[in-house]
Image (cartoon, rainbow, N blue to C red):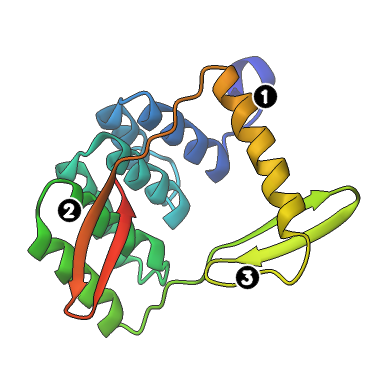
Amino acid sequence: MIGVYGIEPQMEHYACMVDLLGRAGLLHEGSNIVKNMPMEPNACVWGALLNSCRMHKNTDIAEETATHIFNMNSEITGSYMLLSIIYAASGRWEDSAKVRISAKTKGLKKIRGQSWIEVKNKVFMFSAGNTMQGGLELIHGVLKDLALQMESEGYIPNKRIIQQNVDKEQNLMVEA
């Protein structure tokens, strides 16, 4: 980038490289980039590596990566949840529960996921756990069409899940 285009890599460029390497399963290479950055990596760069650890079920790099994120005093609840999911996927249920308890003790709460979709020039916003007042049938139709199109292009959804006993009253389903 510097030699050919005269562009000095910024934090976002490093995050993208770490994400690309991680998705390709090159977690050690991604980790080395983060550790050798000319600037202090932020939570987004570390988070890209942590997400790759989830995808490839690598608890060793995940633990090291999460430690860096947690030491930043980052209040990104997602990092705690990712590490918990990584532990759960490897059968380390006690460690998974400890991470969730740690987040709860620090007062961190998971922010509800929100999505927007535009259908026929109208924007619909919805969040996890809330039902929409109108347009649900229209949106379901669009989503069904998209799913059929993706499947015709060869997409195979990952439907594996882990059932994790979070506490006595509640079972939480998390993606593996």
The spot of residue 36 in percent (x, y) is: 34, 37
Residue depicted at 59% across the width and 22% down the height: 1
Question: Is the C terminus in the top left, top right, bottom left or bottom right quadrant?
Answer: top left
Q: Mark 3 points at which residue?
A: 131
Residue at numbered disc 2: 87
Which is more toward the observer, 112 or 27? Answer: 112
Q: How far apart are marks 2 and 1 (CA)?
A: 42 Å
Mark 2 secondary-structure assignment: helix
The residue nearer to you, when weighing 2 against 35, is 35
Task: Please tell me which of labels 2 and 1 falls first in the chain.
Answer: 1
Query: Which residue in the structure is indicated by mark 1?
Result: 6
Q: Verify CB contact (< 8 Å) between mark 3 and mark 2.
A: no
Q: What residue type is labelled 2?
A: Tyr
What percent of the width, then of the height, locates residue 95? 11, 62
* Foreground disc of the pair 1, 3: 3
Give the number of the mark in front: 3 or 2.
3
Q: Residue 56 carries which label?
A: none
- Find residue 85 and report its image quarter: bottom left
Number of disc labels: 3
Left of 128 or right of it: where is 32?
left
Where is residue 160 drawn, in percent x and y?
Answer: 30, 41
Q: How crowded is mark 1: few (under 14 residues within 10 Å), some or many (20 or more)?
A: few
What's the residue type where badge 1 is placed?
Gly
Report if the CB atoms under discs 1 and 3 are less than 8 Å apart. no
Q: What element carries label 3?
A: loop
Find the distance from the CA under tag 1 to the CA under tag 3. Answer: 50 Å
Point out the tag, 1 or 3, that comes first from the N-terminus: 1
Looking at the rendered structure, the secondary structure element under dot 1 is: loop
Name the residue located 11 percent from the left edge and 60 percent from the top edge: 93
Residue 9, horizontal then vertical, whole percent: 57, 35
Q: Nearer the viewer, residue 35 or 18?
A: 18
